[in-house]
Image (cartoon, rainbow, N blue to C red):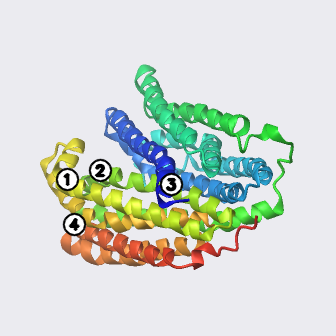
Amino acid sequence: MTLREQLALTAFLSIPAILAQLSSVLMQYIDTAMVGHLGANQSASIGLISTSTWIFMGFCSATSSGFTVQIAHLVGSNDFARAREVVRQGLTSVLAFSVALALIGVAIAPSLPRWLGGNPDITADASAYFLIFAACLPLQQLVFSCGGMLQASGNMKVPSMLNINMCIMDVAFNYLFIYGLGLGVVGAAIGTGVSVLITAGLMLWFLTVRSPELNLRQDRGSFLPQRATLRNALGIASPMWLQNLIMRGAYVMNTIIVAPLGTVSIAANAFAITAESFCYMPGYGLEEAATTLVGQSLGAKRRELARRFATITTASGAGIMTLLGIVMYAFAPALMGLLSSDPDVVALGAKVLRIEAFAETMFAVSIVAYGAFVGAGDTLVPSALNLASMWVVRIGLALVLTPRLGLQGYWIAMCIELNIRGLLFLMRIRGDRWMKSRLIKV
């Protein structure tokens, strides 16, 4: 492939994924606004268990990666029959895993808000929301897994369009159940659950019936997971499970560090994180493309092509997020003004956003390079780098700087940490060891 063809293929795979990521952020904005209109207690009830929902979703996403990476390698080696075997075994495995996870979630739902320190005014809504969320986890697992398998075959368009459609349906169903039927916080959970149900069904249909490479009508095979497939999946997913658990714990620790700064700082921190998400969502879209391109290239035993795709996607992510960082720096007050009418919150949020603008380039490198590593089945070392960077550098610096400089000190610590993390990932991707993973045997 010429460089021009490589760039065109990268753009072809990346643009739908980037649009899906942006639509997801927009959906979160609209959901937050819908629930926010119900009152402070209703907003707090969802906010209380948000970290817990992220942990459960992270486990589902990591489990999906254990099988989608294998499929990308097999598609790259043109072994479509074995790729379909992994599809069958993967669907059985992820559903069994997500059902077990859902049962755990349902069991802890009544007590979770109390464990998290929620006051009695919000625990009932928080428990109900988490109960519905947990019950829908198998459906969310299907969305992750079927979409990832389609992406692994090179089809980024269908899962991305279905994810965008899910966001639109989520807004519509939330409006119906929250306001039309007057169900409040429970309505928000039901609306999201219905949109996930429809999307899961469509994803599964496209994967098993319509996909030229992976539809299961082409041959017959067992849905019973085999040892080799599970071994590969565990080798990829288990470091990601650990990373998900400990990284979310770090976010809880970050919240504890910021909480004593007062209401203005807490609000400015939350809104600034929301505003920044528009900068890094394109990076996560390119991460998905990197996983597919690198996985297929290594499956075809074309290591040099895998390296070039890793370089192209990482450089593209760095370029896009650098430009968005410049925009964020220039328009920080306006971005904060869209989220808050409090002049103190807007002023402080704009200051920390301008600090964070200097981290966007290296943040992009860490995001997209991680996708390339996952495509190679190299998840252990990158996960360890993420954990060390977060817990040692960010939290260590935040504990020192935040009491002295307030919220700006915390965001300085975050900026430094993201730059260090990006440099660590840049050093690793320039080497060869990440392409020598022994986890996947195709």
Q: Look at the numbered discs 3 and 1 and tell me whether their residues touch, using CB distance below 8 Å.
A: no
How many angstroms separate mark 2 from mark 1 (CA)? 9 Å
Dot 3: element: helix
How many angstroms separate mark 3 from mark 1 (CA)? 37 Å
User: Which residue position holds label 4?
Assistant: 408
The disc label shown at residue 332, or none:
1
Q: Position of residue 23 (x, y in %)?
A: 42, 40
Q: Look at the numbered discs 4 and 1 and tell me whether their residues touch, using CB distance below 8 Å.
A: no
For the residue pair 356 and 258, the one nearer the viewer reads as 356
Q: Position of residue 260 (x, y in %)?
A: 27, 64
Residue at point 27% right, 54% down? 272
Q: Amino acid at mark 1?
A: Ala
Q: In the image, which is nearer the foreground, mark 2 or mark 4?
A: 2
173 in relation to 18, above or below: above
Residue at point 60% right, 47% down? 144
The disc label shown at residue 275, or none:
2
How many angstroms separate mark 3 from mark 2 (CA)? 34 Å
User: Which residue position holds label 3?
Assistant: 5
Q: Look at the numbered discs 2 and 1 and tell me whether their residues touch, using CB distance below 8 Å.
A: yes
Q: Residues within 10 Å of mark 4 (few under 14, many from 20)?
A: many
Q: Earlier in the sequence, mark 2 or mark 1?
A: 2
For the residue pair 331 and 338, the one nearer the viewer reads as 331
* Residue 240 located left or right of residue 345: right
Q: Is residue 120 visible?
A: no
Q: Earlier in the sequence, mark 4 or mark 1?
A: 1
Q: Look at the numbered discs 3 and 2 and tell me whether their residues touch, using CB distance below 8 Å.
A: no
